[in-house]
Amino acid sequence: MSTTNLGWTSSGYKQRYYTPWGYKYTFTYQWTGDSWLIRIDKHPSYGHRRKDGDSTHRWTRHSEHYVCWTQSLRSFAQAEAVAHLWARSTDTYIATGVFPRAR
């Protein structure tokens, strides 16, 4: 697993993350004034798995997908940890059809 920081863009801070299974994800972290949002820019194909927001733990706004997380992410470190957890959980979902519960 590795992380490549791609830097600031007009829409937020961009980062590429490779999971232990070797899948590549790209996220844009967006500060809203009181919390970070995590936009999912790139993820592996879900293949034959369901792609709806409930199954994949994503929500959509203006055709952009975001990591579904109910608690405020007040620090960048928290947002980064949640993004990486979501990516590893998505790997598990693609492989097994079960999205692990957050602990």
Image (spheres, rainbow, N blue to C red):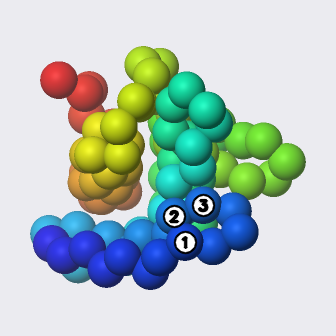
As measured in the structure, the alpha-carbon distance from the residue carrying label 2 to the one carrying label 3 is: 4 Å
Kindly identify the amino acid type of the residue bearing the numbered disc 2. Tyr
The relative height of residue 26 versus residue 101 in the rendered view (above or below) is below
Where does residue 49 sit, x and y in percent of width and height? 49, 52
- Numbered badge on residue 36: none
As measured in the structure, the alpha-carbon distance from the residue carrying label 1 to the one carrying label 3 is: 6 Å
Question: Badges 1 and 3: C-beta atoms under 8 Å apart?
Answer: yes
Question: Badges 1 and 2: C-beta atoms under 8 Å apart?
Answer: yes
Kindly identify the amino acid type of the residue bearing the numbered disc 3. Gly
Question: Of residues 35 and 71, which is closer to you in this image?
Answer: 35
The residue indicated by pointer 2 is 13
Q: Residue at x 78, y 42 (%)?
A: 61
Query: Is residue 98 at least partly visible in the picture?
Result: no
- Numbered badge on residue 12: 3
Q: Residue furthest top?
A: 71
The relative height of residue 61 versus residue 12 in the rendered view (above or below) is above
Q: Residue at x 63, y 73 (%)?
A: 9
Question: Badges 2 and 3: C-beta atoms under 8 Å apart?
Answer: yes
Q: Residue at x 85, y 48 (%)?
A: 62
Q: Residue at x 57, y 43 (%)?
A: 31
